[in-house]
Amino acid sequence: MKLGVNIDHVATLRQARREFDPDPTAAARCCERAGAEGIVAHLREDRRHIQEKDIRALRKIVATRLNLEMSLDEKILAIACSVGPDVATIVPEKRAEITTEGGLDVVKHFRKVKKAAAALTKAGIEVSFFIDPVAAQIIRTKEAGVEMVELHTGAYANAQRRQQISRELDKIRKMTAFARGLGMTVNAGHGLNYNNVQAISRIPGIAELNIGHAIISRAVFVGLEAAVREMVKRIKT
Ligand code: PXP
């Protein structure tokens, strides 16, 4: 299982001063040195952290795989097609949210997401949909011509009681097997941290975990390289 590090919050810190430091490209290099096998960045419509120039700079220096998280906004879609990340992960986006809240509703917005996926695929970009671990969403993703999903682990991460945790874990396990059975690539992420990641990392069939907030938070105390190494170790052992 691979680790993709979401570096949005490196840019959040830089935007606090709107100057140059810390530099997301330096962070990406550091994550890769520490064993990350992918770099994830979300170009939000409100540009609260990652900017268009960051995505273009990351495209030049990322040696592993660059995964651009994005909404279905036409302008963002045009930027994605011109920059050409390795992967574009379509996420739902609301302006007022603090972070991505639910999964993309592929069932409800089927025509729109299918059209966006086709445009990205035509530009040579692999497409992934960030969805809740629900069979209907997986089926419609496949029908939209998209072969990769990122299963939303937020409900698992937020679960408090043991029973609830194991119910959410079970959903992720079952939906991973279901999507793998359809020949799809399965990634997972959101809300994962050093304590809750191992149960997810033991689920067979998940290719990659995308983790941001926990790693950048840990980096404040131990440095980014050490924080990434610790997470890689948790995932791989
Ligand atoms: N995957 C997706 C699709 C996301 O939107 C995010 C948050 O930007 C993450 C993973 C990482 O979530 P977290 O920062 O909670 O680790």
Image: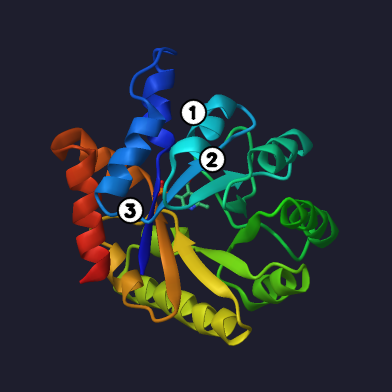
Residue that protrudes farthest toward the left in the picture = 222
Q: On the image, numbered disc 2 is attached to which residue?
A: 42
* Residue in the image at 31% along x and 77% along y: 202
Of discs 2 and 3, which sits in the foreground? 3
Rendering colour mode: rainbow
* Residue in the image at 40% along x and 17% along y: 16
Q: On the image, numbered disc 1 is attached to which residue?
A: 49
Q: Where is residue 77 in the image (x, y as percent from the top left)?
A: 73, 41
Task: Using the rendered view, name the quadrant where residue 51 is placed.
Answer: top right
Of discs 3 and 1, which sits in the foreground? 3
* Residue in the image at 49% along x and 28% along y: 49
Residue 21 in view in this figure: yes
Task: Using the rendered view, name the quadrant where residue 180 is placed.
Answer: bottom right
- Answer above or below: position of 147 versus 82: below
Q: Where is residue 223 in the image (x, y as percent from the top left)?
A: 18, 37
Q: How far apart are marks 3 and 1 (CA)?
A: 21 Å
Residue that protrudes farthest toward the bottom in the picture = 181
Q: How far apart are marks 2 and 3 (CA)?
A: 17 Å
Task: Using the rendered view, name the quadrant where residue 201 is placed.
Answer: bottom left
Q: Within 8 Å: ligand 1 and the Cβ of disc 2?
A: yes
Label 2 or label 3, whichever comes before in sequence order = 3
Q: What residue type is disc 1 on?
A: His
Query: Which image quarter is the C terminus in?
Result: bottom left
Q: Distance between the residues labelled 1 and 2?
A: 8 Å
Whether pointer 1 and pointer 2 mark residues with C-beta atoms closer than 8 Å, the reply is: yes
Query: Which image quarter is the N terminus in?
Result: bottom left
Q: Is residue 226 left or right of residue 2?
A: left
* Residue 36 disc label: 3
Q: Where is residue 93 in the image (x, y as percent from the top left)?
A: 63, 42
Label 3 or label 1, whichever comes before in sequence order = 3
